[in-house]
Each structure stands twice: as structure tokens, then as C-alpha cells.
Image: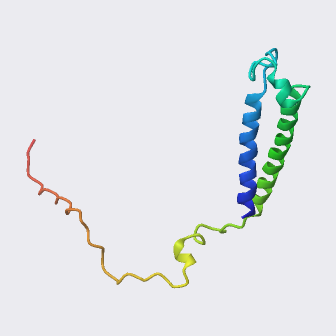
Amino acid sequence: MLHNIVLGFHLLAAMLIIVLVLLQRGKGADAGSGFGAGASGTVFGARGSANFLSRSTGVLIALFFATSLTLAYLATQRKGPSSLLDSSPAAETSQPAPSAPPSSSPPSELPPPPSDPAPTDDPK
């Protein structure tokens, strides 16, 4: 249960990091190219979008790192079967599997193998 919740936060943080990185402008790009001439100043404040997006990306990266460590810890704490025989469906049921009646051999759908031809006396 806890593993699924942390995994959900992990995936959400990863998607938001991708979106925030794609929203950030490159080095040398104009400040308002994505939002119009001066719209970035009014949407994100007087300093522009760089400070807000950079800090948001940093916070999300810290959250992503924390959820990564938490998922690694939770994965080591899970108790799984100690062998493949323990995880078989027959081992999970309390009743033993029904045994087949004894028979000499199971019926075969394959035709019988061809018999060896009789040796012939071929003088060579």
C-alpha cells in the first residue's frame, strides 16, 4: 500500500520535472518569446519566470530523489517467497493436489516409430 503511494508521488514528480524543464527558456532566448512580449513579467512577477521555474525544478528534483530512496528502501523490505516452490499455486492451497491414477504410460497422440527394415544380403 505504502509502496504504491510513494510510486504515485514518484511518477508525478517525474512528469512535473519534465514539464518544468521544457517550460524553461534556453540560454540567450528572449524572456517573453513563449508568453508574448511582456507577459512573463506579469505572470511570474517582476523577476520573470527563471527564478520561479528554477526553484520549482529544484524542489521537484529533491522530491524525486527522496522518493527514489524511499522506493529503494521499501523494495528491500518486501518479503517474497524464499524459493520458486514456495510461490507455486499448489503450495498456496491447503489441500494437496489430486494424484493421477497409476498407469504404465500416458496415451500418445504420435504415430509409432517406423520399424527397422530387414537386412538384405547385397554383395558388393
Q: Quadrant of residue 4?
A: bottom right
- Which quadrant, please, contains the C terminus? top left
Q: Is residue 36 above or below residue 7?
A: above
Residue 26 in the figure: left or right of residue 103: right
Q: Tell me: residue 27, above or below residue 82.
A: above
The image quarter containing residue 25 is: top right
* Rendered location of residue 33, percent (x, y): 75, 18
Task: Point out residue 39 in the picture as x, y percentages from the top left corner.
Answer: 80, 23
Instruction: From the viewer's perspective, tell me whether residue 98 is left or right of residue 66.
Output: left
Relative image position of residue 35 (x, y in whole percent)? 75, 23
Residue 117 vs residue 26, the one in the foreground: 26
Residue 62, given in percent of the width and then of the height, sits at 85, 43
| Of residues 121 and 70, the one drawn nearer to the viewer in this rendering | 70
- Using the image, determine if residue 25 lies above or below residue 97: above
- Please report the residue visible at 57 percent of the width from the left and 70 percent of the height from the top: 85
- Closest to the observer: 67 or 56? 56
**Residue at the (78%, 49%) spot, across then down:** 68
